[in-house]
Image: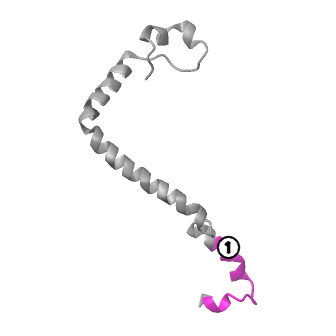
Amino acid sequence: MSNLPLSFCESELTRQYTNLPAVVVDTLHVNMEIKRFLKPHEEDLEKVLMRKLRALKEAAKLRPETPLPPTSRAEAQLRLLPCKQCRNCPFTSFRK
């Protein structure tokens, strides 16, 4: 939320340089109510969100250290597709 007065944000002269819609007073009231509702739970939310963020950071640190890039199961099956079609493939003994 900016510190600009509402009259400045609602001004047609100001909005002619942006493609943003006008700020509606109802939207401002809803945002203030949400902030007021979440204020008592702010510490709990911060703990949970920081825990999730730490997990994401750890996963990001591990990603460059692994030699193989992550692949989906569908990609792995598509890589084996040519092996299933050839007769003298060395992998045919493993498919039984």
Crowd band around label 1 with a 10 angstrom C-alpha radius: few (<14), some (14–19), many (20+): few
Q: Residue furthest left?
A: 40
Q: Residue at x 54, y 21 (%)?
A: 20
Q: Is residue 26 left or right of residue 80?
A: left
Q: Residue at x 62, y 69 (%)?
A: 68
Magenta-highlighted stretch: main secondary structure? helix
Q: Which residue is mark 1?
A: 79
Q: Is residue 8 left or right of residue 75?
A: left
Task: Tell which of 56 and 61 is nearer to you.
Answer: 61
Q: Is residue 18 visible?
A: yes
For residue 31, above or below residue 89? above
- Identify the image quadrant of the C terminus: bottom right
Q: Is residue 58 left or right of residue 46?
A: right
Mark 1, secondary structure of its residue: helix
Task: Tell which of 23 and 2 is nearer to you.
Answer: 2
Q: Residue at x 27, y 33 (%)?
A: 39
Q: Is residue 32 magenta?
A: no
Label 1 amino acid? Answer: Arg
Q: Residue at x 72, y 77 (%)?
A: 82
Examine the image and state in which quarter residue 30 appears: top left
Q: Is residue 59 left or right of residue 19?
A: left
Range shown magenta: 77-94
Q: Position of residue 15 (x, y in %)?
A: 55, 13
Q: Position of residue 40 (x, y in %)?
A: 23, 35
